[in-house]
Amino acid sequence: MRSPGRWTAACRVRGSRGMSASPTGDATSSRRGPQRAVTAPVACPPPSPTLPMSAVIPADTLHAARCANRLAASALAIFFAAAVVLHGLRPDLDPVASQMSLYLIGAWGPLLQAAYVALAVGMVALGWGLRAAHAPQARSAAALLLFALAGVSLTVTAYAWMDLPGVDRSFEGFVHGLSATAAFLCATTGMVVQSLGFLRDPAWRRSARWALPGALLCFASVWILAAWREAPRGLAQKTVIAMILLWMLCAVRALASRTRFTRPALRATETSGH
């Protein structure tokens, strides 16, 4: 693809052929006799439109982003399926009053623990895929780091049980509460940072229209959940989790669409003809 500067230079060279300038500045006469003048302008094709930098990324990076997005989509499906199945397997727990942490305790607890770990891996994969699909100047490690911290906190939450009602407080219960809070805050903050990153890349600005309001709503909901003690704990917590999962699902779809229509960049050896 020729740049506008190259086309301009080519037009000047082609337009000046057949003309020679004399020392006195006369372009139509010289010691060799009159030269043929150009009678018509040289037609030059218009410059090709420039694409956003994220529209052309290395082929290996593009393939890795697609694989990471598939991993994130699988993790979301695993967590959602496990959560739905567990509500049917635990009729002893009230779905409105019982938090998700109570489903980690009991015979079917390992199923939800595995789903938590899968979701943690999916968050990191989604953060990495989104970063890889951005233009270099729009990439930021902050969102990926926050998603990674959320994943680690979620894994700790899965294996550190909460204190059951009526039981004395324990260190394990303290770790569970702290890691659960960190998981919510890091995940929603990472969503906000990632949404702001969409604004820095022209190819992703349309996604910011839904991503930023949704991320801010999830971030505010976490603080409302912490402050509103009279709300049904189970229903309120599961609503916030559902909102976060919905945002992640939309991000997965946006990343899938972006990587599907993105053209892989040619390597240096391919562009040189070797």
Image (cartoon, rainbow, N blue to C red):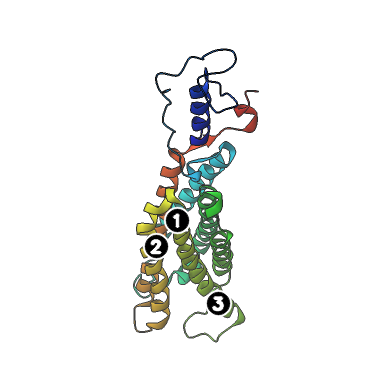
Q: Residue 198: which numbered mark, if any? A: 1
Residue 196 visible to the viewer: yes
Residue type of the residue flagged with mark 1: Phe
Under mark 2, the amino acid is Leu
- Which of these two is toward me, 4 or 225? 4
Does 49 appear above or below 86?
A: above
SS label for mark 1: helix
Marks 2 and 1 close (CB-CB < 8 Å): yes
**Structural crowding at the residue carrying mark 3, measured as other residues with C-alpha within 10 Å and reported as few (<14), some (14–19) or many (≥20):** some
* Rendered position, 116 above or below 168: above
Label 3 residue SS = helix
Tag 3: residue type? Leu
Disc 3 marks which residue? 178
- The circle drawn on residue 127 is none
Circle nearer the viewer, 2 or 3: 2
Side (left or right) of 164 relative to 213: right
Quickly name the residue at label 2. Answer: 212
Q: Nearer the viewer, residue 237 or 40?
A: 40
